[in-house]
Amino acid sequence: MKKDLLKAHILSVLMLPFNFIVVMSLIILIIENNLSITENRFLLLFSLLLIFFGIIILAITVSLFFKIGEGTIAPWNPNTELIQVGPYRYSRNPMIIAVLITLLGIAVLFESSFMLGYVALFFVINHIYFVFIEEPGLYKRFGEDYEKYKKEVGRWFKY
């Protein structure tokens, strides 16, 4: 069973964060005709730190879905346990924050205004999705446990 879950988990990571970070970034940078990184050392260091921390947070959140949630990050194979540990103590959506931080790092690395637009669009779409689809679905699956968690931890940051 765990082996099947691992395969589903890897597939969901490839289909979601990998596509939104790597594939979409490449497409945007190619369209923008901008495949050269910044020559500014401060921006280079800052962007690499953002990318590093974004990927670390992403790895932690993804591993929690596998270890605790018994499901994947994909909405078509959702977790069966409400995750409230690690970064989920401070944000109900740390995985998306991780993707946003990573995308912001890529935008800075390439000094790309198109990527900054993508970061903003990615945030807005996810915010709308969480409010109207994901949060009602989580309430249906986890009931009062989710409602209590929602009161304790903010959508983006703990109050």
Image: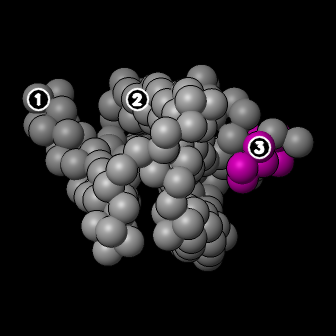
- Residue that appears at 56% across and 37% down: 40
Q: Dot 2 corresponds to which residue?
A: 59
Q: Residues within 10 Å of mark 1 (few under 14, many from 20)?
A: few
Residue 67, image quadrant: top left
Which amino acid type corresponds to the residue marked 1 in the rendered image? Lys
Q: Residues within 10 Å of mark 3 (few under 14, many from 20)?
A: some
Q: Nearer the viewer, residue 90 or 82?
A: 90
- Residue that appears at 72% across and 50% down: 156
Q: Dot 3 corresponds to which residue?
A: 157
Residue 52: x percent and y percent?
Answer: 47, 27
Provide the residue span drawn in magenta.
151-157
The Cα atoms of the two marked residues, 2 and 3, are separated by 19 Å
Q: Secondary structure at mark 1?
A: helix
User: In the rendered structure, which disc, 3 or 1, sits on the residue that comes first in sequence?
Assistant: 1
What quarter of the picture does the C terminus occupy? top right
As displayed, is residue 154 above or below residue 7? Answer: below
